[in-house]
Image: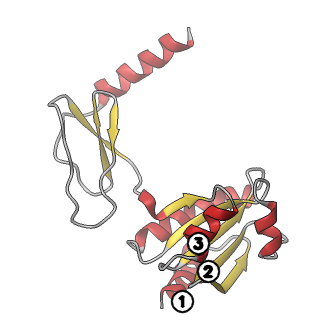
């Protein structure tokens, strides 16, 4: 019963999407059920396969945001990063985190690769939260060359986040 409902929903989605045009920035193409994401770098090329392709509009977060898997991953992707990193310490049960996270991801994506964002779930990575003295969530660190250069706790609006990122990027 559930599979039938899912198939019906997929058919309706595919039927409601307009015929395919070349993808624009912020779009992905759906080819016979296979999702192809556009490249993250400006001016990148798109690959389009068979003619039964539909364009779907989505937000473009790309690879500027990633989830930390373990301490080694944090060391490799954050501490050793040549690009400045915003580290979002959050928890799934945290209401303010659910508001700040997407807002911060959007602001980081606007920086076009000048900064990346690492997401650290404090319940999964308590050791990292302790090491970086996270006592409340959301806590956001700005890291450059492996050092914490700025930090804030709680929710910020888009203007405050933009100022925070500009200070980090320099």
Gap between marks 1 and 2, in whole Å? Answer: 9 Å
Q: Is residue 121 above or below residue 13?
A: below
Query: Is residue 100 at least partly visible in the picture?
Result: no
Q: Which mark is residue 88?
A: none
SS state under label 3: helix
On the image, the x and y values in percent for residue 120 come to 68, 61
Identify which residue is drawn at 57% across, 84% down. Answer: 144
Q: Earlier in the sequence, mark 3 or mark 1?
A: 3
Q: Is residue 75 above or below residue 96?
A: below
Residue 165 pos. (x, y %): 53, 81
Mark 1 secondary-structure assignment? helix
Q: Which circle's residue, 2 or 3, is located before the other in the chain?
A: 3
- Residue 49 screen position, x and y as percent: 18, 36
Nearest the eye: 9 or 37 = 37
How busy is the neighbourhood of tag 1: few (under 14 within 10 Å), some, or many (20 plus)?
Answer: few
* Quadrant the N terminus occupies: top right
Q: Closer to the N terminus: mark 1 or mark 2? A: 2
Name which residue lies at 28% across and 27% down.
Answer: 32
Q: Which residue is mark 3?
A: 78
Asked if residue 95 lies left or right of residue 80, the reply is right
Percent x, y for residue 83? Answer: 47, 78
Contact, mark 2 vs mark 3 (Cβ under 8 Å)? no
Residue in the picture at 30% in, 65% down: 41
Classify mark 2: helix, strand or loop: strand
Image depth: mark 2 or mark 3 in front:
3
Cα distance in 3D space between marks 3 and 1:
18 Å
User: Is the residue marked by circle 3 packed among few (<14), some (14-19), or many (20+) residues within 10 Å?
Assistant: many
166 relative to 26 in the view: left or right: right
In the figure, residue 110 lies in which quadrant?
bottom left
Query: Which of the labelled discs sits on residue 142, or is there none?
Result: 2
The residue beneath circle 1 is 167
């Amino acid at each position: 019963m559930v599979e039938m409902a899912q198939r019906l929903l997929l058919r309706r989605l595919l039927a409601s999407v307009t015929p395919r045009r070349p993808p624009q920035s912020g779009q992905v193409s759906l080819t016979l059920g296979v999702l192809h994401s556009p490249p993250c770098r400006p001016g990148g090329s798109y690959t389009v396969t068979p003619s039964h392709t539909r364009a779907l509009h989505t937000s473009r977060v790309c690879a500027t945001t990633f989830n930390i898997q373990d301490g080694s991953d944090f060391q490799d992707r954050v501490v050793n990063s040549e690009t400045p990193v915003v580290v979002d310490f959050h928890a799934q049960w945290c209401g303010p985190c659910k508001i700040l996270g997407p807002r911060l991801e959007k602001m980081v994506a606007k920086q076009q690769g000048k900064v990346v964002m690492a997401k650290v779930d404090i319940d999964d990575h308590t050791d990292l939260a302790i090491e970086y003295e996270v006592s409340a969530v959301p806590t956001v660190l700005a890291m450059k060359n492996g050092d914490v250069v700025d930090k804030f706790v709680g929710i910020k609006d888009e203007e405050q986040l933009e100022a925070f990122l500009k200070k980090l990027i320099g």
